[in-house]
Image (cartoon, helix red, strand yellow):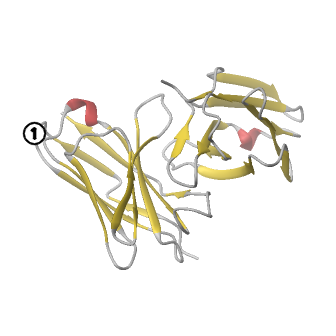
Amino acid sequence: DQQVKQNSPSLSVQEGRISILNCDYTNSMFDYFLWYKKYPAEGPTFLISISSIKDKNEDGRFTVFLNKSAKHLSLHIVPSQPGDSAVYFCAASEDGGKLIFGQGTELSVKP
Amino acid sequence: ETGVTQSPTHLIKTRGQQVTLRCSSQSGHNTVSWYQQALGQGPQFIFQYYREEENGRGNFPPRFSGLQFPNYSSELNVNALELDDSALYLCASSLAPQGSYEQYFGPGTRLTVT
């Protein structure tokens, strides 16, 4: 049973435009959500997180939105840059223990 | 500030053998978690160590075991290797099992079982 799902395996965006990556979850006990970015041959790099008591968190070009009623979160990258091309994973946590990851979305930002 | 390091980078083993992977946590972090990432999938939680004790375990058989040392470094041991154990093994450190949700990952160890 996949508790965290990223239904888009890939996304292609033009440089300077907005990238929107989506993630759905099923477990209402999740209280913290994170986004990680992964380049080939490297470990995941933490990007941004959000607590379940908030609906938006912003850090520079990155904004995460949480819709608890829909059990949906999204990561917005504005403006997108070629260096943002990577695989993005969303992850969820219950009580700060294990992270449960989605399958990942490969973002390609074209110049 | 030193990040999470893992050794070795790559490893090739034969089915039935045993393997030990090592991880040094980020300075100041006292909790280590291990994940297995198969090709095309997200990382899957194996277990977490806090104060040298296992603090949660995912759906992995007992032949996956671990240790955490007083300096917070950790080992992942896998016995009786199977072909399906071929994957990227990731170690992540964090400040505490609860209260700090962000986990910081090392570069991983690529294990190939033939």
Q: In screen coordinates, is A70 left or right of A88? A: right
Horizontal side of A68 relative to A40 (left or right) equals right
- Position of the C terminus of chain B, as image quadrant, is top left
Q: Residue at x 48, y 30 (%)?
A: B41
Q: Looking at this view, is B96 or B7 the one in front?
A: B96
Q: Where is residue B82 in the image (x, y as percent from the top left)?
A: 19, 34
Residue A53, given in percent of the width and then of the height, sits at 79, 49
Q: Mark 1 points at which residue?
A: B16
Residue sitting nearer the eye, A52 or A99: A52
The residue under the point 69% across, 37% down is A85
Look at the image and tell me whether residue B34 can be seen: yes
- Residue at the location (46% across, 66% down)? B31
Question: Label 1 lies in what chain?
Answer: B
Residue A57 percent across, percent down from the top left: 83, 49
The one nearer the camera, B43 or B106, is B43
Tag 1 secondary structure: loop
Question: Which class describes the residues within 10 Å of circle 1: few (<14), some (14-19), or many (20+)?
Answer: some
